Image (tube, rainbow, N blue to C red):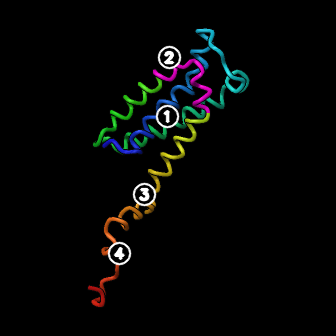
Amino acid sequence: MFDNLFYLAAMAIGFGICLATYRLFANRNDWPMGAFHADLPAVPIMMGLVCVVVGVLFAAARADVGGWLIIVLGFLIALGVTSLFRVGSQVTLFLAPLVTALLLIGWLGDEFGYGRAANIIEHPKDLLKRDGTYP
């Protein structure tokens, strides 16, 4: 249940929410805002929403094994990053796309058959052809 993809999905949701909502909090509380948020606000908002959507889709795919926990942990991460670090959004400009890309690579890699590497290491005999010549 708690594997790397679980944590990546929670971070994608949390960093995405922080990235999408930081301008709102920064304007309301007179926090510092980077040039990217001030000049082109649509770009970080869309980046954040894409990260949230990917994380929620992954949580929905794992609904039977802790999907709701991913979303709750993502909201806690967003709350922590936004409230504790006022410049957390500047960090999430780099972390959110990175975490989302790693989540997509890990998640879709299994779907396209790239998860076989772990199976090859664990059970190499199963990959040998059984034509009667091998023991």
Q: Nearer the viewer, mark 2 or mark 1?
A: 2
Mark 2 Cα shell of 10 Å, populated few (<14), some (14-19), many (≥20): few
Q: Which residue is mark 2?
A: 83
Q: Earlier in the sequence, mark 2 or mark 4?
A: 2
Q: What residue does disc 4 label?
A: 127
| Residue type at numbered disc 4 | Leu
Front label number (1 vs 4): 4
Q: Which mark is residue 134?
A: none
User: Of label 1 and label 3, which has the lower sequence position?
Assistant: 1
Q: Residue at label 3?
A: 111
Is label 2 in contact with label 1 (beta carbons under 8 Å)? no
Magenta stretch? 80-93
Q: Amino acid at mark 2?
A: Ser
**SS assignment at label 1:** helix
Image-based side of 112 in relation to 3, left or right: right
Q: Which residue occupies 37% across, 66% down?
A: 121
The residue at which mark 1 appears reads as 52
Q: Nearer the viewer, residue 47 or 127?
A: 127
Q: Nearer the viewer, residue 82 or 64?
A: 82
Measure how far apart labels 3 and 4 are at the Cα level.
Answer: 19 Å
For mark 3, does the 10 Å Cα neighbourhood hold few (<14), some (14 to 19), or many (20 or more) residues? few
Discs 2, 4 touching: Cβ within 8 Å: no
Question: Do labels 3 and 4 touch, CB within 8 Å?
Answer: no
Based on the displayed image, in which of its 4 quarters is residue 77 positioned? top left
First in sequence, mark 3 or 4: give its number.
3
Q: Is residue 70 magenta?
A: no
- N-terminal of the pair, mark 3 or mark 2, is 2
> What secondary structure is found at the residue carrying circle 3?
helix
Image location (x, y in percent) of residue 97: 57, 39
Question: Circle 4 sits in a helix, a strand or a loop, which is it?
Answer: helix
Distance of mark 1 from mark 3, alpha carbons?
A: 20 Å
Verify CB contact (< 8 Å) between mark 3 and mark 2. Answer: no
